[in-house]
Image (tube, rainbow, N blue to C red):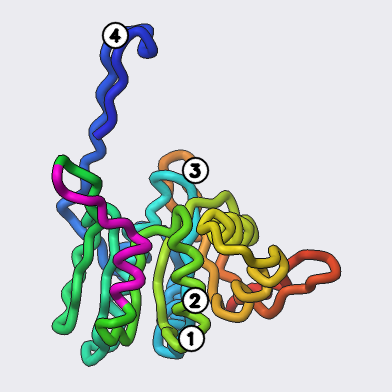
Amino acid sequence: MAAALPPVSLGGTTLTIRKFHSQHFSAQDLVERGTLTLPQLDVLRQAIAAHDNVLISGGTGTGKTTLLNALAAFLPPEDRLVLIEDTAELRLQAENLVRFEARREQPGVPAVSIRDLLRATLRHRPDRILLGEVRGGEAFDLLQALNTGHSGTLSTIHANSAEQALTRFASCVVQSGIDLPYQAVRLGIADCLQVLVHLDRRQGQRVVRQIVRVRRYDAASDTYVLEEAS
């Protein structure tokens, strides 16, 4: 929920309430609704089975969380999942699931950030880490986890394209305050992220526009070499 009061809200008090859907769509539901095609779904299922790290990008309201929730159903039932969210939205039907939710600071109670939870996660022996959204300095801790053997991770990030998602991820790593060369950050991202999925929303329709594989980072041109997944 977000509120704005006069005088900054010229038309009077403005209140916006984000209501989470009680209905959670399966991957097949998304295919039937036209969000993704069967070939795209097959690519993503294979990526999950191969323990690829998958990053889902898109703007606000494009269905990133919905797709993440649907893809999580394909995770092996024997895997130990650790889910980290800022606000609990995902509804996973997994037998071996540990859920963490961030907490804002309250009187007499300190805040618990996504970064705190991500660091704690590594001590809970996760087979897969599911991070609801990358939005700040926790990107560095996620990058560290992915580059030290924690494969098969699913997460989302706000971006306008698959390629921009990589740039945004790097910017979030820089926000962590860790003194790393920018090119080293970009190279580390290329080493640990295998699949990017980009969602778009046009005329009310949520659609997977891109599924690409990250092949490498070209430092000379400061660009990623991406390949359409098929």
Alpha-carbon span between mark 4 and mark 2 = 46 Å
Residue extending furthest toward the front:
108
N-terminal-most mark, 3 or 1? 1
Residue under label 1, please give it: 148
Q: In terms of sequence position, does the residue under pointer 4 or pointer 2 come before the other? A: 4
Where disc 3 sits, the SS reads strand
In the displayed structure, 2 sits above or below 210; it is above
Mark 3 vs mark 4, CA separation in Å: 31 Å
How far apart are labels 2 and 3 at the CA level?
35 Å
Q: Does any portion of residue 207 appear in the rendered image?
A: no
* The N terminus sits in image quarter: top left
Q: Earlier in the sequence, mark 4 or mark 1?
A: 4
Task: Using a 10 Å C-alpha cutoff, classify the residue at mark 2 as few (fewer than 14 neighbours), some (14 to 19) or many (20 or more).
Answer: some
* Quadrant into which the C terminus falls: bottom right
Marks 4 & 1, CB-CB < 8 Å contact: no
Q: Which mark is residue 144?
A: 2
Q: Report the Cα–Cα distance between label 2 and label 1.
A: 6 Å
* Three-letter code for the amino acid on which mark 3 is drawn: Arg
Residue 202 is marked as 3
Q: Position of residue 204 (x, y in %)?
A: 41, 41
Q: Nearer the viewer, mark 4 or mark 1?
A: 1
